[in-house]
Image (tube, rainbow, N blue to C red):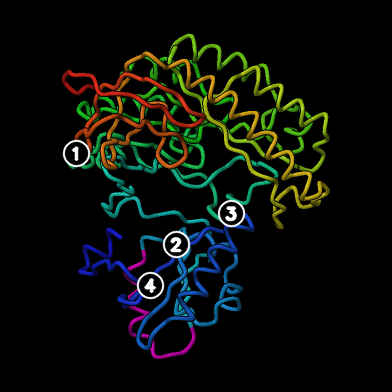
Amino acid sequence: MELLNKAGYQPVERPAWAEIMIVNTCGFIQPAREESLHELRSLAHHKKRGQKLIAAGCLPQRLREAIIDEVPQLDGVISTRRWMDILQVVENIRGNQSPKPIYHIPDVPDMGGDDHGVLRSAVQGTSAYLKIADGCRRGCAFCSIPLIKGRAVSRQPENIIRDAKILQELGVQELILIAQDTTDYGSDLGIQDGLAFLLEQLTDAVPDLPWIRIMYAYPGYVTDRLIAVMAERQQILPYLDIPLQHADPAVLKQMRRPSNLEWVYRTIEKMRAAMPDLALRTTFIVGYPGETGEKFQTLLDFMSEIQFDRASAFPFSFEPGTASESLGDPVPPEVKEERLERLMLHQETISLRRNQAWIGRTIPVLVEGISEDISIGRSQRDAPEIDGLVLIEGQAEVGKIIPVQITGALVHDLTGRMIDSQPGG
């Protein structure tokens, strides 16, 4: 979007008004592919004369020419690895007189693009996502990301800091660091303990940016130095998203995931000792091949012991081409759904208890909107879109971090009232 804007293209609100329609697709699991294809087919069906339709992102990278068979009205495809070439693709498509679509998909895993001076972030209100790396070198058996994204490639620290400074100048209050594996940052650059190093550099470079949030940490790579940096640097929120996927060692080995549960217990104990208000989010897969009822119960027991603040779960999705393909998909769909429901109900009980512990406390809240006489915001414990909200009595200033006394707790959300003092963060 930033490249197109700089070249004079303007976004429009409705597809019917567009000259160029670009769909940024997902190819990770079957439901996401189906959703992407549905959107492409819908736009193709209503495409007017002169309009051009481009499929971008992960789905073209994974399906390549097959996507044209699914949506023959496409005018072009551009893969996730060459997003920085969107201008070239758009111009070529606009001048293309041939009915054949234009392909822009590399055969080699070249991520490129970090020297284009483009701000790789998505700003939402006063929060912004900032990508620090792309691709993944982990060998998780169920995961298609390496097939789509290729090897892990870290951005240069100075380029990340450049973008962070721009975001600070734009008034962003929350910077959310993302990658397929943030804890692997810098490994390809020869930087030891790269995420901790980057956080030190960032907090020094953008001292007026109040909140920095870390997503997608990998088990086994949350180091003592990272914990210390998170605890010592007040801008770094006491929040960590660390997808564990399961808790039965046999299932984890089948997944080709770290299966040392002692590391999990020990590391979480260290983190909570260093950051008493730490909020932990995780993700689990249910119905993985080999997951018996007993192994699923091991997962529920583990959740009871750790007491995660937030947890998401998904039924196993059989993905051709991944290392788990040979295992098949033996767990029936109805069993997957039953386990998914049980797990989420179990987590709701834990989440409610964790939320209730905040009643009576005063916490900083980033205000994001107003609905009648209620202000809506997020606490340090809540990442955008995936976690809860704080519902505040009265009208607060949107985009500000204000102190809120918590008066009530729901399963996902908190309620509170504004404290009469200067905003803080």
Dot 4 and dot 1 residues touching (CB under 8 Å)? no
Q: Residue at x 52, y 75 (%)?
A: 41
What type is the residue that disc 3 sits on? Phe
In the displayed structure, 163 sits above or below 388; it is: below
Residue bearing the label numbered 1: 171
Q: Please report whichever mark, 1 or 3, sits nearer to the chain's N-terminal start.
A: 3
The residue wearing badge 2 is: 24
Residue under label 3: 28
Q: CA distance from mark 2 to mark 1?
A: 27 Å
Q: Residue 330: say if magenta.
A: no
x and y, in percent, of residue 170 in the image: 18, 42
Q: Which residue is mark 4?
A: 21
> What's drawn in magenta, residue-wise?
85-100
Q: CA distance from mark 2 to mark 3?
A: 13 Å
* Amino acid beneath label 2: Asn
- Frontmost residue, 210 versus 198: 210
Q: Position of residue 90 (x, y in %)?
A: 34, 74
Identified at 58% across, 54% down, the residue is: 28
